[in-house]
Amino acid sequence: MTNKSKNNKNSKKKLILAIVCIVLIGISYFLFFASMSRTGKEQYVLIDQDDNIDSVYNKLQPLSTPQGFWVFKQLSELTGYKDNIRTGRFSVGSAGSLQTFRHIHNGLQAPIKLTIKSVRTIDDLATEISSKMMFSRSELLSQLKSTATCKKYGFTPETIPAMFIPNTYDFYWDTSVEKFLDKMSEESKRFWTFERKEKAKAAGLTENEVITLASIVDEETSNVAEMPKIAGMYINRLHINMPLQADPTVKFATKNFTAHRIYQKWLTVDSPYNTYKYRGLPPGPIRIASVEAIDAVLNYVHHDYIYMCAKEDFSGTHNFAKTYEEHQINAAKYAKALNVRGIQ
């Protein structure tokens, strides 16, 4: 055989070997490194403490490509994953089956963005939060209503809403209630900067009192520009020991949250939240106060007004008055506007 023939055979072998290698690399990439997501978009699988290997497969299969799911099952068998299932929220997306398996096997979760909203009640807060976390609504509510738990963070069941500062926070889905509350406590302390603390002192209010007043301001208006003026009116009342007579506190006490009018019979309801019956601030916030309202209280407008009434144009803003006589005129205008519109 000539050298030329031998060289041709060697070249063909090398070519075949190269083709085989390329094919194997392609198959390996297809199996192990191509996107595992069936849709090609980022999706998430939630694995909780009640899951076993079968339920994990049932959750994962609808999200996965057939080949990606097959590889995941093989890796699970090889590594004994069924005996080491970890809870969490895991991404099934652009990463291949090998990396997805590694993340799920090792508990490397995809964090969630949890937004604390300015909701009305602690029950609403628990509903919002638990819908995004592994722990249940009842688990969270039990802690928020526990005197011992609230005391741990420097609050009472009445003031605990003040610990929640509306913002968006990073959490792992399987964070425990205890760890969640620890984080909220840390964020609350971080919110209360030296400057904010000094402004609270200057207003003659504690941090909890600032947030309690802010919650009333939030209920009075959604107009951020007017909030400091409303806060100033209530602080004027506090300074002269005048009842706050804040309609939102009556709504809270009677649970008539959507009422447009405050009826005389509600003003005598015996509740510490009824600021027509009891002087000073209520025992705690009547909602999760917004950051805008908190800062409005801390930066309240100094003026002489001690009365306000919703404007008759239903703009969401208010008429302010220095005397009761002026206030009665404003109140009559608003009552007339309600009557014209047939609002009860």
Image (cartoon, rainbow, N blue to C red):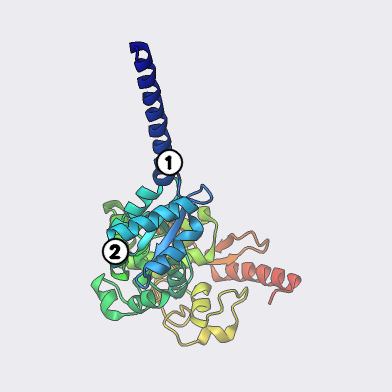
Counting labels gives: 2
84, above or below 196, in the image: below
- The residue carrying mark 1 is 27
Q: Residue at x 24, y 73 (%)?
A: 152
For residue 86, above or below residue 121:
above
| Along the line of sight, the residue nearer the viewer: 344 or 85 | 85
The foreground one among 37 and 116 is 37
Which residue lies at the image location 60% right of the left edge and 65% below the top edge? 310
Residue 262 x, y percent position in the rendering = 59, 78
- Marking on residue 98: none
Q: Secondary structure at mark 2?
A: helix
Q: Residue 324: where, in percent of width, then height?
A: 55, 71
Q: Amino acid at mark 1?
A: Ile
Mark 2 residue crowding within 10 angstroms, few (<14) / some (14–19) / many (20+): some
What residue occupies the far front of the structure in this picture? 1
Q: Look at discs 2 and 1 and give the one toward the viewer.
A: 1
The residue nearer to you, when weighing 329 against 208, is 208
Q: Quadrant of residue 242?
A: bottom left
Horizontal side of 220 relative to 163 (left or right) equals right
Q: Quadrant of the N terminus?
A: top left
